[in-house]
Amino acid sequence: MAKCDICDKGAHFGIKVSHSHRRSNKMWKANIRTVKAIVNGTPMTLHVCADCLKSNKIVRA
C-alpha cells in the first residue's frame, strides 16, 4: 500500500531509543501521494513518493 509505483520506496524499520535507552520497534513510512499521471498516453492514478514528484519523474495529467 505505502509503496511508490516509480521507485519502489516503502516503509523502513528500525529501533526507537528513548532518553532512558529503552528500545522499541519503529516504522518510518514514505511520503506517498496519490496523483493522476499520464502513462503511455493514458491518464492513470498512481501512488508516488514526494521525491519522485519533486524530481519530475512523472507527467501529471
Image (cartoon, rainbow, N blue to C red):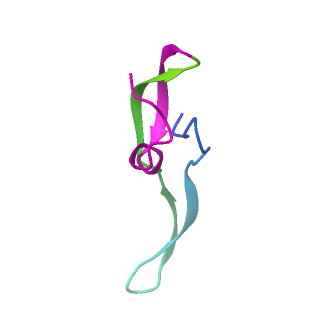
The structure residue drawn at horizontal position 45% and vertical position 30%, both measured from the top left corner, is 59
Give the magenta part as a residue range: 41-61
Q: Residue furthest top?
A: 42
The structure residue drawn at horizontal position 51% and vertical position 39%, both measured from the top left corner, is 2
Q: Position of residue 15 (x, y in %)?
A: 54, 70
Left or right for 43, reference 6: left
Q: Residue furthest bottom?
A: 20
User: Which of the two residues, 21 or 55, is positioned nearer the viewer here?
Assistant: 55
In this view, 14 is above or below 31: below
User: Which of the two residues, 44 or 2, is positioned nearer the viewer here?
Assistant: 44
In this view, 13 is above or below 53: below
Split into 4 quadrants, where in the image is the N terminus?
Answer: top right
Q: Position of residue 16 (x, y in %)?
A: 48, 71
Magenta span contains residue 42: yes
The structure residue drawn at horizontal position 40% and vertical position 30%, both measured from the top left corner, is 34
Left or right for 2, reference 53: right
Q: Residue furthest front?
A: 41
* Tally of numbered discs: 0
Magenta span contains residue 44: yes
In this view, 45 is above or below 31: above
In this view, 35 is above or below 3: above
User: Which of the two residues, 29 or 5, is positioned nearer the viewer here?
Assistant: 5
Q: Position of residue 29 (x, y in %)?
A: 47, 51
Split into 4 quadrants, where in the image is the C terminus?
Answer: top left
Q: Position of residue 26 (x, y in %)?
A: 50, 62
